[in-house]
Image (cartoon, rainbow, N blue to C red):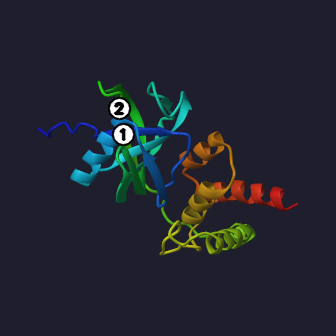
Amino acid sequence: MSAVVNPPTLPLFPLKTVVFPGGRMPLRIFEQRYIDMVKQAIAGDSPFGICAIREGEETGTPAVPYSIGTQVRIIDWDMPETGILHIETQAETRFVIRHTQVEPSGLLMGTVDEVSAEPASAIPQELELAVEILRHIIDEYDHARFPGPHAFDDAVWVGYRLSEVLPLKLSVKQDLLEMNDSVTRMRILTEFLRRQIN
């Protein structure tokens, strides 16, 4: 008789932003519940989840997150002053929240299922504009924001990186995160870029 495997639980950090797999996200932590969460993550080299806020605010009463978020891991941290942590996170895989509960500290914990990663996908020729623009953006930015290896021939990687940096509404970014079709994601982004250029 096989043992029942319980879905993993993940501390959740609801934010007014969307994080995409493979991306980097710097965060400034000052609320006690999140300082405690980050200290535990650093001590145990364990991940936490970032999910966009559907209802509510980043501080105070726990916000209501969208059901799909991204697991991140802390790769660097600093405490420039007492009570404020600066962390650099690396985004890993997407997850679906099945259930949430609020800890006494106010931290939101989620029972989650991992969403399998999209397989790498070739970029159709008619969407090469998006690749060119992303190359320009990365050249303009500090390369610390986009560390290598770069995958300009992969629709998944290009689509995620453009989704991060383009000035899109939060709900649109969330839709792009939830999609499992990298070429459709690229088409939406290319159309947005064409509208900006014309």
Task: Tell me the SS state at disc 1.
Answer: helix
Residue under numbered circle 2: 107
Q: Nearer the viewer, mark 2 or mark 1?
A: 1
- Cβ–Cβ under 8 Å for marks 2 and 1: yes
Image-based side of 176 in relation to 111, left or right: right
In the displayed structure, 3 sits above or below 26; it is above
Q: Quadrant of residue 130?
A: bottom right
Quadrant where the N terminus sits is top left
Residue under numbered circle 1: 34
Q: Nearer the viewer, residue 134 or 107?
A: 107
Q: Quadrant of residue 16?
A: top right
Residue at position x 53%, y 68% from top?
Answer: 146
Three-letter amino acid code at the position of disc 2:
Leu
Question: Is residue 40 something one can see in this rendering?
Answer: yes
Three-letter amino acid code at the position of disc 1:
Tyr
**How far across and how far down the image is residue 158, in percent?**
59, 65
User: Which mark is first along the chain, 1 or 2?
Assistant: 1
Residue at position x 63%, y 75% from top?
Answer: 139
**How far across and how far down the image is residue 67, in percent?**
48, 35
Question: Is residue 111 something one can see in this rendering?
Answer: no
Q: Nearer the viewer, residue 5 or 62?
A: 62
The disc at residue 103 is none
The answer for how far apart the CA atoms under marks 2 and 1 are is 7 Å
Image-based side of 180 in relation to 71, left or right: right
